[in-house]
Amino acid sequence: MTTRTKSLTEDFAKWLGRYSPRNSLKADPAALEAEMDALMRALVKLAPMHGHLKWLEKVTDQLDYQMKTVAWPTVQELGAVASNVNKSATRLDRDHAEWRLDPVAVNAKRINAGESVGDEWLYGCRAVELLRSGLVSQDQVGKYRAYLYASQKSAYGEDAARRMEDEAKQKHDDAAGIYRDVGCGPKRSPVKRMPICAEEMV
């Protein structure tokens, strides 16, 4: 008997101790033993290879909730509950696998809320993707660019600020060209997106 099987059967036997075998089983020790074996086989068969005790806790909790008598569950009842727990876990795993953080949506939300964003969302490939998403307008990004220019002018002087702005605009134009060349359209998927930054295509 494996460690997994041993721990499952021991914990399930403790849970069964809170209930009573059906009267027809109490009168026949062989039938009682056969019923216990059948329950254990069903349990071990349906339990996951990892996290089986947490899984068993969910199964027994659900059985506690839905059982209408103090008699042992049948193999069919146990199997139905265990299968439902497995389906629920599979659905959660699938949903988790399909969800991915969407940085474009996150930064669009920040701009719409008037919060700060990194410079890469104002010029360059990230900014191109952000604008093509339709989640923010050109005017909104323009206001952020004006604020960036004013900050740079205050910190470095007008000549340096204009030079930095020209470099940023050129970077943005280059990124727009890359965006067109890789064939990205204006519509984006919330899960998958085509990389447009040079560093993403390496």
Image (cartoon, rainbow, N blue to C red):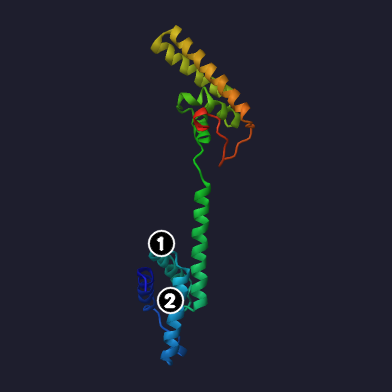
Residue in the foreground of this view, choosing between 170 and 23: 170
Check residue 50 in the rendering and tell me which mark sits there, or answer none: 1
Circle 2 Cα neighbour tier, 10 Å, few/some/many (<14 / 14–19 / ≥20): some
Q: Where is mark 2, residue-wise?
A: 40
- Residue 35 versus residue 58 in the image, above or below: below
Residue 97: x and y in percent read 50, 49
Residue 146 visible, this angle: yes
The amino acid on which the numbered mark 1 sits, given as a three-letter code, is: His
Residue 77: x and y in percent read 51, 75
Q: In this figure, what is the number of numbered marks?
A: 2
- Residue 67 versus residue 53 in the image, above or below: below
- Residue 3 versus residue 176 in the image, above or below: below
Residue in the foreground of this view, choosing between 149 and 191: 191
Is disc 1 placed on a helix, strand or loop? loop
Q: Is 175 left or right of 34, judged from the image as shown?
A: right
Residue 122: x and y in percent read 51, 23
Is disc 2 placed on a helix, strand or loop? helix
Task: Give the residue drawn at x 63%, y 35%.
Answer: 187
Task: Give the residue drawn at x 47%, y 15%.
Answer: 149
Residue in the foreground of this view, choosing between 39 and 107: 39
Task: Give the residue drawn at x 60%, y 27%.
Answer: 179
